[in-house]
Amino acid sequence: MTVEVRLTTTARLEEVLRLPVDAVSIGQEGCAAKLPARDTLRQAVDRITATGRRAGLVLPAAWQRTGAQLVDLAADLAQRVPLTLTVNDLGTAAALAGSGQELAAGLALMPGRPHDAAQAPRRPLQPPVFEDAYLQELKGFGIRTLETEAEADVPDRPGWQVRRLIDVTPLAWARSCPTARHHQLAPPHCADTCDQPIDLVATHRWQLGHGHREPIPMADRPAQVPLTVYGNAVYATTPTAHAGDNNVIIDARFYSPDALTERLATVRPSVSAASL
């Protein structure tokens, strides 16, 4: 089992490096404007690897205007130290296929959730299913590591690693950022607002079988999971009861310093809380 803590900035890096974690990654899936500056990332990556931990850079899904910039950043950092490059679009994956570094398919590359309007209602979050054909496509880019939500259905195949995000489930990323609109700011001036969460409750749903929006019946609303918006991403709060022996990712945004320490103690019961 390995435990990776994910940060979106370097503000909590020293805090996390004092904890019993195997890896620290920096970045997120949604927006290039949120990534720390290149020099800041260089220093952070050097600091992480100096402690003997695996360092990771999470590259957001690249739009046309940011694609070359993100690839150049990743190539620059990857020349310095061993680095996991998590990609969230296939174009970036293709550009970095020969980097010589570990490439991971990020959370934004998870397959869609099964949906059939003709079936009886199922639980609110039907887990995504990774098909063998999709794994073969990713393998063509040199990807043999997957990042998924905790409950994703992934076939057990030799040579593949799976890292599961616990306690929260990413649902969607918006190209037009709701957080920037809420604060009436434009990129990159909105970056400081990305880590200010906005809590939501779903009252309507899109009925794919009929192509229209409809209210969620009052009787079904208690079953709707709490939603949190960070930047242009929407997450559902889905506490993971048992991490088991899985390789896990913990997104530090969802935990205060004390809560993060306590969560690590439950993920790794052999590490006593007093030693953290």
Image (spheres, rainbow, N blue to C red):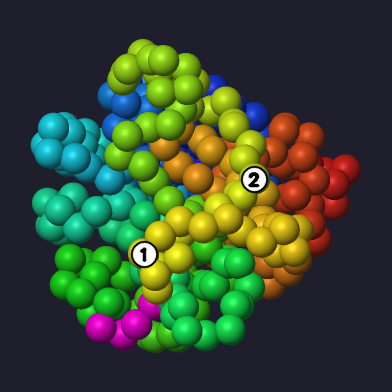
User: Does 135 appear above or below 50?
Assistant: below
| Label 1 secondary element | loop
| Label 2 secondary element | loop
User: Looking at numbered disc 2 in the image, what kind of residue is underneath it?
Assistant: Val
Residue at x 29% of width, y 58% of height? 103
Which residues are the magenta region? 129-133
Q: Is residue 248 left or right of residue 220?
A: left
Packing grade of label 2 (10 A; few <14, some 14-19, many >=20) is few
Which of 188 and 222 lies nearest the eye of the viewer?
Answer: 222
User: Does 193 appear above or below 237?
Assistant: above
- Tag on residue 80? none
Q: Whole-percent x and y of residue 47?
A: 46, 31
- Residue at the right extreme? 274
Q: Specify which label sits upstream in the sequence, 1 or 2.
A: 2
Q: Is residue 132 magenta?
A: yes
Depth-wise, is mark 1 or mark 2 nearer the camera? Answer: 1
Residue at x 39% of width, y 70% of height? 210
| Badge 1 vs badge 2, beta-carbon distance below 8 Å | no
Residue 168 in view (yes/no)? no
User: Looking at numbered disc 1 in the image, what kind of residue is underneath it?
Assistant: Gly
Packing grade of label 1 (10 A; few <14, some 14-19, many >=20) is few
Q: Whole-percent x and y of residue 272?
A: 85, 52
Determine the CA span between mark 1 and mark 2. Answer: 22 Å
Residue at x 54% of width, y 38% of height? 229
Residue 223's quadrant in the figure?
A: bottom right
The residue beneath circle 1 is 211
Q: Is residue 268 magenta?
A: no
Residue at x 45% of width, y 42% of height? 233
The residue beneath circle 2 is 201
Residue 42's quadrant in the figure?
A: top left
